[in-house]
Amino acid sequence: MHRRNILSAALAATGALFAAGSRSARAETRDAAKVVYHLSDLEKVQFVLGNIDNHLAGAGGPDKVTIQLVVHGPALRAFHAAAANPETARKVAGVVKSDVRLAACGNTMRGQNVTLKELLPGFTIADRGGVVLIAELQAQGYVYLRP
């Protein structure tokens, strides 16, 4: 019987250590979370910007998560400064203020004949393409989301 007690105690201690390590690993992952949002559908622009706001709030703020939004295809039209609706411009300004990085696909920009100056403030150019940037970010450990 004595051996069973020793074995039970050892198993319980191992389980407790494993559980504590798992909680610690989850906390570190949450603190260092990196996410790339992929947006190409024009009709999803407001939805994705809302998701980003919700993500920032749910994660505990911009210091708890790094978010990159990569835009290409028809969705980029919503970010042309001259044509952007006020709600889009307001949301973009808000996410930029929260340190969300915005990247516009260089191929789409050329296709739509738009320059960086003609987009809402905060964008950078993904020179080699939006999908190339997304793949690079995933290789760096970013979680991929395409709402």
Image (cartoon, helix red, strand yellow):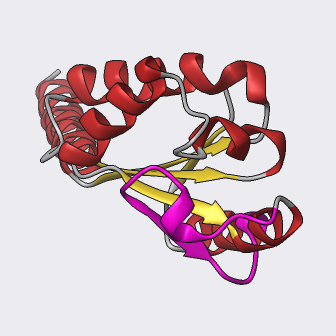
Locate residue 2 relative to residue 70 in the image: left or right.
left
At 65% from the left edge and 71% from the top edge, which residue is drawn?
Answer: 133
Splitting the image into 4 quarters, where does residue 82 fall? top right
At 77% from the left edge and 64% from the top edge, which residue is drawn?
Answer: 131
Q: Position of residue 96 (x, y in %)?
A: 28, 47
Q: Position of residue 112 (x, y in %)?
A: 83, 58
The single residue placed furthest to the front in the displayed view is 82
Locate residue 138 relative to residue 58 in the image: left or right.
right
Comparing 55 with 88, the one in front is 88
Locate residue 20 relative to residue 84 in the image: left or right.
left
Does 128 appear above or below 17?
below
At 13% from the left edge and 25% from the top edge, which residue is drawn?
Answer: 5
Does 142 appear above or below 63?
below
Splitting the image into 4 quarters, where does residue 50 fall? top left
Q: Position of residue 137 (x, y in %)?
A: 56, 68
At 14% from the left edge and 38% from the top edge, which residue is drawn?
Answer: 20
Q: Which residues are magenta?
A: 113-131
The single residue placed furthest to the bottom in the displayed view is 128
